[in-house]
Each structure stands twice: as C-alpha cells, then as structure tokens.
Image: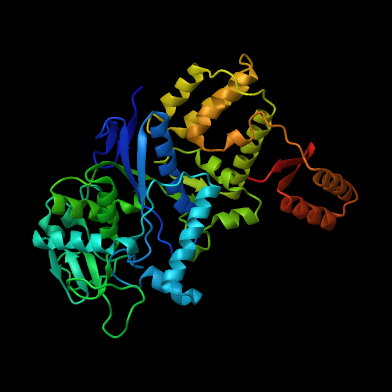
Amino acid sequence: MTLQFFNTLSKKKEEFTPINTGKVGMYSCGPTVYQAASIGNFRSFIFSDLLRRVLEFNGYEVKQVMNITDVGHLVGDGDTGEDKMIKAMRQEGKSAWDVAEFYTELFIHDMELLNIKRPTVLPKATAHIDDQIELTKTLEEKGFTYTTSDGVYFDTSKLADYGKLSGQKLSEKEEGARVEKNPEKKNPTDFALWKFSPKDGKREMEWDSPWGIGFPGWAIECSAMSEKYLDSPFDIHTGGEDHIPVHHANEMAQTEAARGHELANYWMHNAFLTVQGGKMSKSLGNTYTLEDLAEKGFEPLVFRYFLLGAQYRQPQNFTWEALGAAQNALHNLEDIVRAWDRPGEVNKEVINKFKTQVNDDLNLPAALAEVWNLVGNEELESSVKAATILELDDVLGLKLDDIVAKSLLLPQVVEKMLKDRELARIEKDFEESDRLREEIKASGYLVEDTAEGQKVREAR
C-alpha cells in the first residue's frame, strides 16, 4: 500500500521512499523552553507524533530526534532582540538555566499527558555547543561567512538556491516588519551563526569560540544536532509552516553549503491553529496551554482528539465549542468500547481502509470516519471491533487500551459521593454539588452532567 506525503520542497505529494530500507530518520523542530508550550505549539508536536505512528504502522523503524532550544533563540525573527531565555529569567527571577530546566520538564510532562511518544533523542542546544562551533568553522573555511560587530553571519548570496523551500527568490525577500534591520548585514536574509556577548556585561549563557565569547544563532543547532544523530541527508524534517521562510531555509542553507547536499529529502509542515478564526498570540490573550484547558474541564486527550478532525496541512480553528464537541465524541467512543467483549480477531478489511486514509498524506479526518464506521457496524462481533480498534489506536494515540472491554468499577466512597451529589442537585444545592465534584475529581474520576443524569469516567 503506497505511502504518500506532501513535500514542501517539491510542492507536491510524493511516494515515500526511505534512504535505508525499513528505517526512517526523522527530525522534528522542538520547543524553545522559556515558557509553557501552547496548544498551537502542540499541534506541531502532535502532527509529528502522528507521522511517526503512521510510519511505524507501516512497519518502519523510526529514529526521531527533537531539539530542545534552551539558548540562542532571540525575540526577533532575525538575529536581534533579547534571548528569550534571558527575558524569561528576568521576568521570573530565576537563572536562565533554571528557566530552561523547568520548562523542559513541563514540556515532557505535557507530551506524556497528550500521549505523544517521547522522541528517540531529545538533545539540548546547550549540550551541543561544540558541534555548532565546528559546523560554523566549516562554513567559514568554505567562504560562506563574514563577521560584523555583533556576530558571525552566513552570506546567503553565496548560495544560488537560498529560499527554495518557500519558493521565494533572494531578491524578493525584504528585511523589516518582524525582522529588525541590521545595517552591517550584506543581505537582508543573512543570518547569525554565532552572536557575540555584549561588551558591557556578562551573560549567564555564553561560551568561548574562535570568534569570541558568545552564543549560537538559532538555526545552527538544528543543522548540527540533526546531522550528529541522523547523519545527512536524513529522511524527513517536520515543523510548523512558520518555519518555512526563515528557520528551515537557514537550516537547509547551512548544510548544503557545508556538506554539498540536502539536509533532508522530505520537508513536512503543519498549518497554524487559529483561535476564533484569528491568529493565536500572547498579545491578544488567546494563547492557551494544557493547564488552561484543564481549568475549563478538558482532559489533554480531548485536545488530541480535536486535532484529528483536520488534515495537518489545513488551518484548524480552535473554539471552546469545538473542543466541547470533541469531548462529547471521545467520551461517547469510550463509553461504547468499554462495553465490548474482550479483543478477538482483527478485521483486516477495516485495517486496510484505515491505512489507505492515513497513508494518503495523513488524512486523519477520513481515518477517524473509518473508526466510527467500525463502531457502528452491527455485523461485526464486539470482540472483533475491540481487537481492530486497538490496532487503529496505535496511530490515533487515544489510549483506548485503557478503556476497551474494561468495565468501570467505582470505589464505594466514590459511589457514595455520586449519590450525595445527585441529591444535592435535586435540592438545588449547587455549592455542595460543586464541592463533591471536586472531591470526586481528587479521587481520580470526572463527573459530567447530561440529560440522562450524571456520567462518571476515570480521569486520564
């Protein structure tokens, strides 16, 4: 069964052919750990997780590398402004190292809540400074760099096809807007490989280099670490569509200039997650985290289910109403599969229909429709449905193995609180009802009020 992905580099859907038979090397742009990752960030991370799961569903052994950017990512889209880690340090009153460690641990925790498979390698930029310096030295030796008062820069005019990922010619790219102009740069698109520390003070995160004390530019870490763990070229590079014109263009340029070949064969990018039809941004106050979702009663896997409703290359609009619909659908699915018999034989026809959809550039909405067709198929025994849906969930990642054919046995203390809560609602004592809801939640169970009465489920 053919596996096809849309390649941003070729601007078309292509049949996937790995470099090494049966194995896939995959690099996913990871978080900059100066704050909690937003649900917009997690669209990208869940996309890469689904891609990995689809590859494994097709029998490939996947080595996934995801970077942790804990230094060198500046506030500006170019090479200007404060280091985001240093800015967070000042705001939180912690050291830059403590900020990075705290948000790295939070990111890993949130990944687990969303059932995102931990990448095979999760390297930190600060642990690979020497690799970044060596790559910069190679670029310098090959004549692709120049030095200004604030750093060592890559000269994009030396690479004829710079910008090919976005399809934009070098002459069409302009500096300005979100990128602050730098009069010392030879070309607006030139970017920093190494930034010098300010002469009037010492940074917490700085290192010696052949060019002076400083820190690496943003893009150099990805080229250096992907090559270290995957070699180059490798098979697939993923990230959000916002990386296409600058960050990924710069990664490609560095490796092509230093090694004389492409960084990766397939480039795959997810579209933005919008909020109420508009851009998600901190300035608009609509950048939500998993903690924000939890405060409104939504479990992390509900958000994962919500994302299955759109193909990754299409913009997806987040609303609380849409998340509520996803919650109802997921909980309905859980209630149905819990009542099934223990898993028996797998239905290969259903598996193949599902695989046809996910192999077509990760068409998860169509694949999810096949799941509901399975659920509603009255001709199949529930034991067959149970075995089949567990295989499909290897891709979906909804943790249905915790639910399928497992009746919910409530502790007596929870049963009593549910009865007391039902009585409180009848007597319109909503304060007591809310208190009992929180006590039940603390016991590991969630209560929903429906037209049919209270529904309870394990918190996941």
- Residue that extends furthest to the right in the rendered view of this protein: 427
Figure quadrant of the C terminus: top right
Which residue is situated farthest in the bottom direction here? 200
Q: How are the colours assigned in the image?
A: rainbow
Question: Where the N terminus falls, by quadrant?
Answer: top left
Camera-side residue of 96 and 277: 96
In the image, residue 354 above or below residue 172: above
In this rendering, position of residue 37 left or right of residue 213: right
Q: Nearer the viewer, residue 165 or 434?
A: 434
Residue in view at x 47 percent, y 56 percent: 280
Instruction: Residue 88: give x, y in percent of width and height.
Output: 45, 71
Q: Residue at x 63, y 32 (%)?
A: 333
Relative placement, left or right, of 306 versus 75 is: right
Frontmost residue, 418 versus 361? 418
Q: Position of residue 212 (x, y in %)?
A: 20, 75
Task: Choose between 243 and 314: the one closer to the eye.
Answer: 243
Q: Position of residue 416 (x, y in %)?
A: 85, 46
Q: Residue at x 77, y 40 (%)?
A: 410
Relative to 415, residue 381 above or below: above
Whether residue 369 is visible: no
Image-quadrant location for residue 389: top right
